[in-house]
Amino acid sequence: MHLFLFDIDGTLIQSGRAGLRGMNLAFERLYGHRQALDGVPFAGRTDRAIVRQVFEKFGYDATDQEITKLRDAYCEDLATEILRPVADPSGILPGVERLLDRLSSDGAPPLGLLTGNFARGAAIKLGHFGLFKRFRFGAFGDDHVDRRDLVPVAIAAARGAGVDIESPGAAIVIGDTPLDVECAHAHGARAVAVATGPFSTAQLARAGADLVLETLEDQERLLEWIEGSGIRQEKRGTRH
């Protein structure tokens, strides 16, 4: 039995940079700093890590209370920004809906999320495109600062949803950044990397992805890899 864990931004959807705009607006509204995220890397990181770095940038204590306040303000702004027509690419990425259909066939375990997004932010983004209902559980940016800590969270959530997963070796993390690959391998899961985000296939291969795809339209290759690469029985050891 395989457990499929999907990243969101650059893997399932493009949000027209609504997340960046929403978080910048939240920081400006609460703390008076415009374009607060300038110079702060986004790709593959948890929202919690991003928020902490911005607090440190401006000399604020990143307490749980302040992070929660910023998170709630951000989600309010995100819900508005996701609706805004913009020139930046926005929509469901190629092959996503068909792949989710194929992986959700009768008898298959439910699909999960493994994302750096805050849980409410994930619901807003995927809900806008009608995809959030496709996922029964997940691990989110609320849970940890370090994305590498999210695989055990996702597996515990899967078991809570009734998925009989024996070990992390049965989990397949599907994402678009080297941090998704690192996150998977840190706990013995497999990593499928897709070049629909900011990284090329060559960069994702150098990061050590077990399988690299141009887009999720290349489903036959993905399914053949799942069935033919020994993933059915192999249990990977945990790497730190």
Image: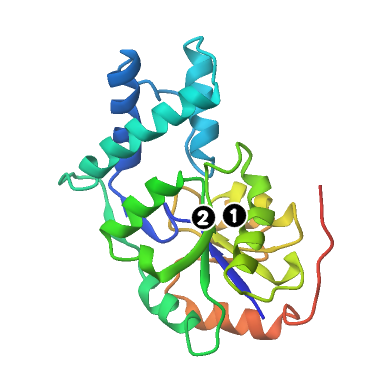
CB atoms at circles 1 and 2 under 8 Å apart?
Answer: yes
Q: Residue at x 63, y 39 (%)?
A: 146
- Vertical position of residue 169 compared to residue 40: above or below: below
Q: Name, please, the residue furthest toward the bottom.
A: 106
Question: Quick one: SS at disc 1?
Answer: helix
Which residue is rendered at x = 53% and y = 23% of the image?
53
Q: Amino acid at mark 2?
A: Asp
Q: Which picture quadrant has residue 68?
A: top left
Is residue 40 in sight in this rendering?
no
Lower position in the chain sequence, tag 1 or tag 2 = 2
Give the residue drawn at x 46%, y 83%: 102
Which mark identifies residue 106?
A: none
Q: Amino acid at mark 1?
A: Leu
In the image, taking residue 136 as reference, residue 160 lies left or right, namely right
Q: Is residue 182 left or right of residue 129?
A: right
Q: Which mark is residue 176?
A: 2
Check disc 2: other Cα within 10 Å, few if <14, some if 14-19, many if 20+: many
Q: Would you call the spot at circle 1 few (<14 residues within 10 Å), some (14-19), or many (20 or more)?
A: many
What is the number of the mark on residue 204?
Answer: 1
Residue 8 appears in view = yes
Secondary structure beneath dot 2 equals loop
Q: x, y (%) of residue 95?
A: 38, 73
